[in-house]
Amino acid sequence: MPTITYIEFNGTSHSIEVENGLSVMEGAVNNNVPGIDADCGGSCACATCHVFVDDAWLARCGTPDTQEKSMLGFAATAQENSRLACQITVTDALDGLVVRMPEAQH
Amino acid sequence: MSTEGPEAGIVIIGGGHAGGSAAAFLRQYGYKGPLTLVGTEPLLPYQRPPLSKAWLKGEATAESLALRPARFYTQQNVETRLGVTATALDREAHSVTLSDGTTLPYTKLILALGSRARPLPLPGRDLGGVMELRTAADADRLQAALKPGARLAVVGGGFIGLEVAASAIALGATATVIEREARVLARVACPALSAFVQDYHRAKGVDVRLATGVEALEGAAGQVTGVRLADGGLVPCDLALIGVGALSNDALAQAAGLDCANGIVVDIAARTSDPDIYAVGDCTNRPLPMYGQMVRLESVPNAIEQAKQAAADITGRASPMPEIPWFWSDQFDLRLQMAGLPFGATQTVLRGVPDVAGFAIFHLGADNTVLAVEAINAPADFMAGRVLVAKQKQVAPALLADLSSDMKSLAA
């Protein structure tokens, strides 16, 4: 199973094996990683699973669609490497992915 | 204290989104003691929003519906007691009696009792094929009945009724929505949004009857065959969904003498009138400091926010930042997103033209403070509105209405 590393805003790091096919958001929620709220359960309606993707991994995570881009455009502290974790599907190609959490999701 | 029985710890009554989230946040925030989650339904906490949409249409699985997988509760050392209901609360003894006759002691208690469908005292409501939609079991019954060609009658033009009507059309059934008020979503949306949504449903084949009262449910051989209207008309149907709002499940709290008024009264840290008892989610009547009002909100974001408040207070963490209430709904290819509440709004500003391509309606106070936004297929306007509401920004109506205005700079 691919290993995803989630780094909280305070620096606490969680390396977790996440099943292929789940989203990066589900990997965090299923393992109680703090900092990803996922109010809407993964339907790209809330922007509370905002993460920063390490640059080396950005291209492999795919391109955000219009809905995601629109939501991210107004997320607090959004950057070039911002993504919604519910829109990134875990595959073997993402083994080793590192995502960092913003200070707050709201 | 007695040395018999289980060691007292935190007990959560209610296995919905609020209760499940409270368990997760307590562990995230470092609570290491005994933690028991009691749920009336036989299922681990799951997401209710898909029940009227993806689940009904067969596009979700039990796994994707679950909030977290079963192993989560083992790994996080959360004891789950499913299929049992709390029947009595003894505040003096710090214990809860369950429907299986057992008693659970608690140090702190979190009531996440949820809400139930508002009953409609109509003749014929016990006929077969008359349904409500709160639980996965309700959704399974509804799904089994929504075969192609089935005739669905929905009493109540709220979110659930409209979502189910849209799903029914997608499944090849027919749908009639019967609404007592002159517009759908009358309690939750502004007239312009209601007008757009009801027109859209009609264009997609839903028969929307407005300002129409319901007299009775009629049946034959114990099965519903139609909805008799107040004007004497009949809407023939094979199944009838009643969706006329929800009531707080606060009976347990009332019986125990906790302050209740349209739900269990809590403060901004989800504390009830008993210092050892918290309440979270649909069952509460909670303050919204930004609006200076008490409100009973039925939404997932509210359940999660209050779960955080309770877990933070119990573990001695700083209270989380207050959030702006928000809601979403998917109907056909429409995504509705709303943020804020239009308390005290005196101005309505339309941004864009009402069309499936996307538009938003902003609600402003007399001093141009943005109080709420309602967006359809306009996620950027929704997000901008959420920021404007949170910052209590004042924006000139003409600027908001002007599509060439850069929302990012307005929200900055």
Image (cartoon, coloured by chain):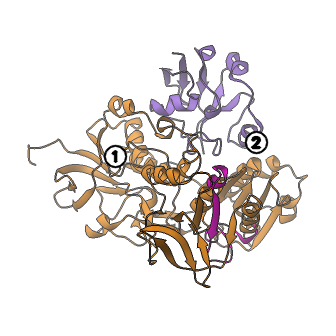
Q: On what subunit does the disc labeled 2 rest?
A: A
Q: Residue at x 65, y 32 (%)?
A: A87
User: What colour has chain A?
Assistant: purple
Range of the magenta residues? B167-192
Image vertical order of residue A71 relative to residue B14, above or below: above
The percent coordinates of residue B129 (x first, y second) are 47, 62
Residue B42's tag is: 1
Badge 2 crowding class, 10 Å Cα cut-off, few under 14, some 14 to 19, many 20 or more, is some
Query: What element does badge 2 sit on?
Result: helix
Q: Which residue is mark 2?
A: A70
Please tell me if label 2 and label 1 are on a single chain.
no
| Colour applied to chain B | orange
Q: Pinpoint residue B71: horizontal percent, then vertical percent.
A: 37, 29
Q: Nearer the viewer, residue A94 or B118?
A: B118
Task: Look at the image and say whether residue A77 sits in the magenta stretch.
Answer: no
Relative height, residue B132 to residue B144 (above, below): below
Where is residue A101, by image quadrant?
A: top right
